[in-house]
Amino acid sequence: MVFLGESYRKPVNDDITSMHTLRDIPGLRYTLREQRRQGQRIALVPTMGNLHAGHLALVKSARKHADVVVASLFVNPMQFGPGEDLDGYPRTFEADQAQLIEAGCDILFAPTVSELYPNGLDAQTRVHVPVVGEGLCGGSRPGHFDGVSTVVSMLFNLVQPDMACFGEKDYQQLAVIRKLVSDLHLPIEIIGVPIVRAEDGLALSSRNGYLSREERAKAPALYRTLRELRDAISRGEPIEQALHQGQAALYDAGFTPDYLELRDTTLGAVNDSTRDAVLLAAAHLGPARLIDNLSVQLPSAARSASH
Ligand code: PAF
């Protein structure tokens, strides 16, 4: 049984006009129980903070679909591998709070690590989504999607939202979450929100902040390469050859590519009957590992690409 401290017995305003920031599970549960009792539809926007216009687009989309918008802010240690940027990941709590209020968020859930993982990471039950989480980012970042799936499952369980919004920039993450929700029969609608780009085409990402001025000037080459590849493939250029040229273009622009692949929209292999496909790229530029993706319509003569 969950103990609710005295402060959580206070009725929450019927009409939320400013954002509540909650750091603990009992407070979150109590507040949302009130909202649910009033028949409100609840949307969840999970984030790791350091918010930019891409995150705010998630909040705005949630706002359109739901009565109550809950954002979570938690830099999830379980989804970072050894040597990754967990310690350096930007923590900008006050600025994030201000942006969430401005975007129309009602409740911010910002737990500590010990609130979500009271027994430590090693003792923690984990959620593994097979197949769709393997390869691509799952191949380069072993355990990453187990960390994502575990924390998102927890957030789904704690918030019990009617819907949740995720960015399409993290294409594989979105596919993993859709599979998790389907396999576990969770009654949650997953809403994919289009990528938000800077004027020069670079997909917005918290990790863009790691780039020096020179690297930032080179960074749009990732999206440019994807667009050139898309055009070449839709013109009927052989896929393997186009991908090879794309890799070379990334090296020429100063990137070290991690992967550049064409998959069908469920992340399965492309075959002769595939028409809707997606180009997915991850590449290192200085200290940042950037990811991006772009939809491609395949011409009928397109040949399958191995990956
Ligand atoms: O996309 C992110 O920021 C994170 O992977 C998420 C979904 C908030 C889980 O920690």
Image: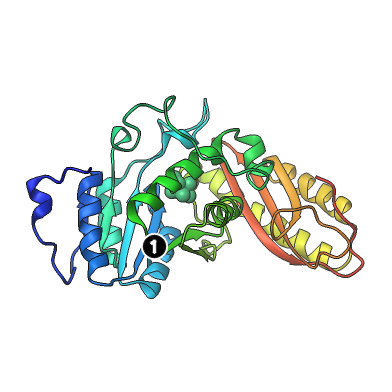
Residue reaching furthest front? 1
**Location of residue 200 by image quarter:** bottom right
- The residue sitting at 60% across, 35% down in the picture is 141
Can residue 35 be seen in the rendering of this structure?
A: yes
- The residue sitting at 55% across, 41% down in the picture is 145
Q: Looking at the image, which is closer to me, 125 or 93?
A: 125
Q: Is 106 positioned to the left or the right of 74 in the image? A: left
Where the C terminus falls, by quadrant?
top right
Q: How is the image coloured?
A: rainbow
Residue reaching furthest bottom? 64
Q: Is residue 240 above or below residue 272?
A: above
Q: Position of residue 161 (x, y in %)?
A: 37, 61
Q: Residues within 10 Å of mark 1 (few under 14, many from 20)?
A: many
Q: Is 69 positioned to the left or the right of 210 in the image? A: left
Q: Is residue 249 above or below residue 124?
A: below
Q: Position of residue 148 (x, y in %)?
A: 49, 43
- The residue sitting at 71% across, 43% down in the picture is 259
Q: Is 267 positioned to the left or the right of 148 in the image? A: right
Q: Position of residue 61 (x, y in %)?
A: 42, 70
- The residue sitting at 60% across, 48% down in the picture is 291
What amino acid type is highlighted by mark number 1? Leu
Where the N terminus falls, by quadrant?
top left
Q: Looking at the image, which is closer to me, 226 or 107?
A: 107
Can residue 50 be seen in the rendering of this structure?
A: no
For label 1, the residue is 56
Q: Looking at the image, which is closer to me, 105 or 199?
A: 105
Q: Position of residue 243 (x, y in %)?
A: 81, 51
